[in-house]
Amino acid sequence: MANPEDSASIPADPLQLVRQAWQDVLGTDDVPLDTGFFDAGGNSMLLVMLSDELSDQSGRELEVAELFRHDTVRAQARLLDPSYEPGAPAPAAAAPAGRGRLLGSARRGRTDAAPAAGPQQPEGSAAR
């Protein structure tokens, strides 16, 4: 049974909520929509802080791994509210050869491109 408070916790503009959280965590006003968190100046500790910030602001508990797989502002806005469409989806790039095994499963492609029976694919620039 759905909790009535759950619908109230979805922000009216998830894109703005995520953008503001990135600005707070990264300490900058220049937050691109389709650049990965690490490419925008983030690091592992800041990703943990972003997870806490977004969880607090959205009322939804977000795992760091989710934010790693959905590593752009646009992708994280869709993570908060899957029905939200903030414009054109971020482009997916093919994974380059030679990437480490640790991050390999997180960099195989987009969620919407995965077959129904296959593994879930991430979206955002970590999909490279």
Image: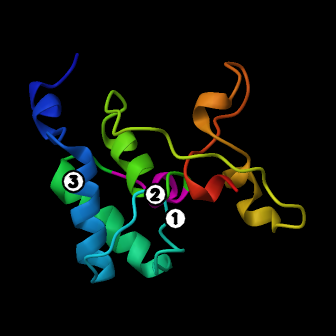
User: Crowding near pointer 3: few (<14 within 10 Å), some, many (20+)?
Assistant: some
Position in image of residue 91 (x %, y %)? 59, 46
**Residue lying at 18% horizontally and 58% vertically, measured from the top left:** 56
Q: Which residue is mark 1?
A: 36
- Distance of mark 1 from mark 2, alpha carbons? 5 Å
123 vs 41, left or right, is right
Residue at image point 19% right, 38% down: 10
Q: In the rendered structure, are the residues bearing label 1 and label 2 in contact, judged by CB atoms less than 8 Å apart?
A: yes
The residue that mark 2 highlights is 72
115 lies above or below 78:
above
Magenta-drawn stretch, dominant element (helix, strand or loop):
helix
Q: Amino acid at mark 3?
A: Gln
Q: Between residues 5 and 94, which one lies in front from this camera angle?
A: 94
Callout 1 secondary element: loop
Range of residues picked out in magenta: 62-68
Residue 111 vertical position relative to residue 60 in the rendered view, above or below: above
The residue singled out by tag 3 in the image is 16
| In the foreground, 7 or 35 | 35
